[in-house]
Image: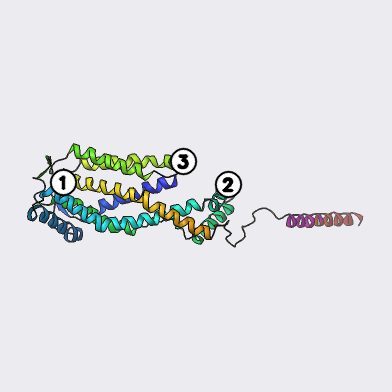
Amino acid sequence: MKKTTKRLLFSGLALSLLFFLSGCVQQKNGVPTGEGWVYKFLVAPMGGAIKYFANDLGLGFGMAIITVTVIVRLFIILPLSISQIRKSSLQAEKMAYLKPVFDPIQERMKNAKTQDEKMAAQTEYMAAQRHYGLSMLGGIGCLPILIQMPFFSALFYAAKFTEGISTSTFFGINLGQTSLVLTIITGILYFIQSYLSIQGVPEAQKQQMKTMMYVTPLMMVFFMMSSPAGVGLYWFVGGIFTILQQLLTNYYIKPRLRKQIAEEFEKNPPKPFKSGAAPKDVTPNQQETAKQKAIANKQAKAKRNAGKQRKRH
């Protein structure tokens, strides 16, 4: 459930960043004013590239959008994504291999009867993560996401506002209007990617991740239905890239990482982690309790003897 929540949170973060960066492209009456760093340094150059491929090379605006999207995806976004996927996959594979180490600590956290016991187990868990080089965020860093988002935003606006796109067609599709056919195809592409993303994970975890398998395609359909087909082509190409990226992850990156980790731990097998600090004993010390009782009995006996002495006098 934690991994599902994490995925939802980061999907929300990505969408929030997209809307935030949309604000960097200043508009008046729905048209960019030409102000803002995202527009000046990214949208305008990409729009110029689209015009170059469409007009100067005679590809047409449909193929021009696809070409620019492929170039940006292939040489900027894909390397960052692969780097991020490799880091998060390495963390996930390590955690799976170290399950016998972390499960007993998690069990103690779950069954802790006092706050002290729970805090001691949590401290030990974090110490074990540091010992084995694991990140508390599961290898998910914000920097690659932050670097990618301006390019996503720029591609979106270049495809939407570049002059000439709204009056062009591509295989009979009016690029200035919403295309139902393109919407359905793109929704299917993102569903395939989501389906591939849950392959090879444990069955229990797969059930938890199924929510995302439906959420992502539905979000894409929503975007496509509220955007012209020129923007839809951008999402369409993105869908193809996400499928290729997921196939690369499933059948190349993860198997290699799994083999690498297996070799590492074969040389140095993981052992039950000991933090070095003895867990705090929150149960009463029997010897201390017996000593306290003896003192109390002695004091009570002294009081009784004093009372007897007063009566004699």
Q: Which mark is residue 204?
A: 3
Magenta stretch mostly in which secondary structure? helix
Q: Find residue 24 and report its image quarter.
A: bottom left
Name the side, left or right, on which 57 lies relative to 295.
left
Mark found first going from the N terminus, 3 or 2: 2
- Density class for disc 3 (Cα within 10 Å; few <14, some 14-19, many ≥20) is few
- Residue 54 among those drawn in magenta: no
Mark found first going from the N terminus, 3 or 1: 3
| Residue 301, percent from left and from top | 84, 55
The amino acid pointed to by label 2 is Asn
Q: Find residue 201 and report its image quarter.
A: top left
Determine whether label 3 and label 2 are within 8 Å by CB: no
- Density class for disc 1 (Cα within 10 Å; few <14, some 14-19, many ≥20) is many
Q: Is residue 272 above or below residue 185?
A: below
Query: Is any atom of residue 144 visible in this view?
Result: yes
Residue matched to label 2: 111
The amino acid pointed to by label 1 is Gly
| Separation of residues labelled 2 and 1 (CA atoms) | 56 Å
Tell me the magenta residue range.
Answer: 285-297
Residue matched to label 1: 230
